[in-house]
Image: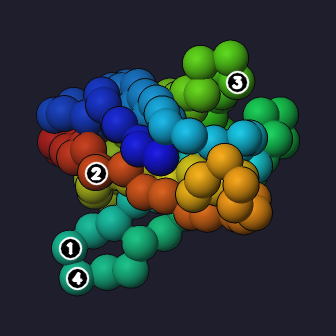
Amino acid sequence: VQLQASGGGLVQYGGSVRLSCAASGSMFSINAMGWYRQVSGKQRELVAVMSSGTSATYADSAKGRFAISADNAKNMVYLEMNSLKPEDTAVYYCNAEVQTRLCSSCYIYTANYWGQGTLVTVSS
């Protein structure tokens, strides 16, 4: 399974940016897809996650400003970020928890995957 994230870049204070992430590869289903972010020297933290394509959970810092959505048919997840602040500057990583298997006769298991990360820089 591969996750391809896109949409980062430089944005001004108060601006908006939309991140996209596409999941591809062999999988039976997606339990959840979401976004995390990491600042150099700090731990990766949850931003928002969409479970089963319908239930969204947000970090307190994202509530009211960010919106996560999913296109289940395309195995994609999006993060619309509004009213951006300099403290939102980070590398944003797409994450997916999927049901998959290694071969046609192998058992199905749950696996967690990360995308390559996309940098969002908010200028003050």
Between the C-alphas of marks 3 and 4, the distance is: 34 Å
The three-letter code of the residue at mark 2 reads Gln
- Residue 84 quadrant: top left
* Label placed on residue 72: 3
Q: What amino acid type is highlighted by mark number 3?
A: Asn
- Mark closer to the observer (1, 3): 3
From the image, tell me which residue sits under label 2. Answer: 116
Three-letter code, disc 1: Ser
- Circle 3 packing at 10 Å, graded few (<14), some (14-19), many (20+), is few
In whole angstroms, how far apart are the C-alphas of marks 2 and 4? 18 Å
Instruction: Answer left or right for 50 relative to 21.
Output: right
At 42% from the left and 57% from the top, the residue drawn is 114
Name the residue at 41% across, 44% down: 2
* Residue 108 marker: none
Q: Along the horizontal axis of the image, is 87 left or right of 75?
A: left
- Residue shown at 60% from the left, 53% from the top: 103
Q: Are marks 4 and 1 in contact (CB under 8 Å)?
A: yes
Sequence-wise, which precedes: disc 2 or disc 3?
3
Q: Earlier in the sequence, mark 2 or mark 4?
A: 4
